[in-house]
Image: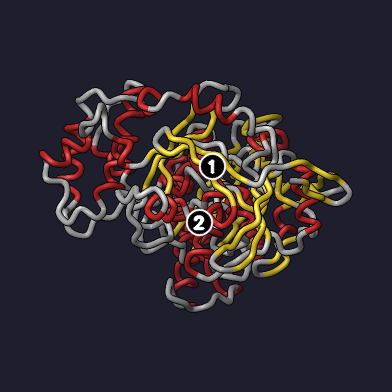
Amino acid sequence: MTVIAGSVKVESRDYIVFFVNGKMQRVAGDAAFLPLSDYLRGHLNACGTKVVCAEGDCGACTVMLGRPLDGRADDFEYKTVNSCIQYLFQLDCTSVITVEGMLEDGKLNAVQEAMVECHGAQCGYCTPGFVVALSSLVVECQASSQSVGCDQVKEALTGNLCRCTGYESIMAAAIAASSQKMQSFSDKFPSAPMLSAMSTVRSIPVAISGRLTGTQSVFYKPLTLSAAARLKSDHQGAAIISGGTDICVNMNKRGLTPSCIISLSGIDDLNQLTIADGQLIVGAKVTLRELEQFVEDKIPEFYKILWTFGSPQIRQAGTLAGNIANASPIADTLPFLTVMEAQIEVTGKNGARRIPIGRFYTGYKKMDLSSDEIISLVTIPLPGHETERALKSETTRTLLRLYKVSKREHLDISSVAAAFYVTVTRAETGRQRIALAKVALGGVAATCIRSTVAEIFLQDKSFTLDVFVEAGRIAAADLQPLSDVRGSKEFREQLTRNLFVKFFYESLAELELETDKSYA
């Protein structure tokens, strides 16, 4: 098949290839536009995978998804994902393992046995998802010689819901299983033969026409960013997809039927994740989980926000670029990116340009993107880097605090999110002076905003409780938040005031201050 992108003709294939429990699947036409969960149940009769919410919240549809390891041609890296929001067109050249594939030598694996022995299932509808998530945890911990404790189990099961069994017996099953040696997924389904079978098609772009929920659509998987930009230019309104954790929910639940979908999964140049010259550089394909693990000891505050972003299944599919492109005013990463004055690199037919995040959003769900441009990279200054350059003083402290206020810790949308980036200097008299203040608030306007009125007020003030109480009052008075299911206007204003006070108290220890001192 020949695809014309602008004036360039590209030979492509009209099918995708992937494996399910070690067996090759070659899918074309309408079937390529199915959610993986529907394909497993309706086409392969692999009905152990259940579907409840169809939006990635319950975990009943959890499967293992293996992607080729970067720089290696002999192995996959397996991670749990929600199969209800992974469409087949996203899965070209991957390996999927379902609950049916958890068996070892035709018998229940250690997790499955433990779920039986510990009475970890009642109705059993959620059980397959729990089995897959726990098997992933145990295998991963055994491979890295880590012990499996309650904290690890709780995190691994953040995205799995059970309404009748109760989690105590499920956690007991996980602990019991961890003492039994389990096969790695690569031992169970050897990677080399699958990767060899894929090698002939990986270098060929994909173009498939079919029906997406009854509407004619076309899917493209280009292999270069320039090709993706040309395709986006040729197909106005095309949906750009990488992890798909938002767009696939909209296709499942809100009737979204893009006439054209362009995947970034074949563009290796978008995997960049590194630090250079005081900047964190994040490519558009880097998952939130990869980013979370990378920044854990480098930017602990950002790590904490990423950890609460959603379930492991969501973070192992979704991307930072996708969170930015979603353009939601309550996106969890935006307050941090805003106070750090991140740069968004976008690439189009004429090359790349960088846009300060403060100018990237032009309104609610509106971005400074031309019809051919795609987010390709995000660069984020490391906290304290520029401050250290400018001030170079042992009496200077840089404080970064990030907050997400929501009705539950994980898998929830913020009522208010906030970021505080404050530089404090200590004079010889002992006075702590605010030399620089940046405050960003999410969930209180059509976009994530800088609270410039609060920043101006804080400049050159002493680091005292009274100052931050007044700054919070000024910031809240300047807002015009909406009332919705996540909180009233008055609630959001009060939260804003409270977060300024919270920042003050949480910063005292770092500044070696005491609450009963006079700071003036």
Q: Which residue is mark 1?
A: 26
Q: In this rendering, would 213 be left or right of 57?
A: right
Q: Residue at x 21, y 38 (%)?
A: 112
For marks 1 and 2 on the same chain, the one whose residue lies earlier in the sequence: 1
**Does residue 459 appear in the picture of this structure?**
no
Residue density around tag 2, few if under 14, some if 14–19, many if 20 or more, within 10 Å: some
Quadrant for residue 163, please give it: bottom left
Disc 1 vs disc 2: which is toward the camera? 1
Q: Position of residue 148 (x, y in %)?
A: 26, 31
- The image shows residue 195, relative to residue 128, as above or below, that is above
**Mark 2: amino acid:** Leu
- The image shows residue 127, relative to residue 367, as above or below, that is above
| Image coloring type | secondary structure
Q: Position of residue 195 (x, y in %)?
A: 54, 27
Q: Residue at x 51, y 48 (%)?
A: 401
* Circle count: 2
Q: Residue at x 49, y 51 (%)?
A: 86
Which label number is shown at residue 34?
A: 2
Q: Residue at x 11, y 45 (%)?
A: 119
Q: Position of residue 212 (x, y in %)?
A: 57, 63
Q: Nearer the viewer, residue 461 or 441?
A: 441
- The image shows residue 202, relative to residue 429, as above or below, that is above
**Does residue 276 appear in the picture of this structure?**
yes
**Mark 1: amino acid:** Arg
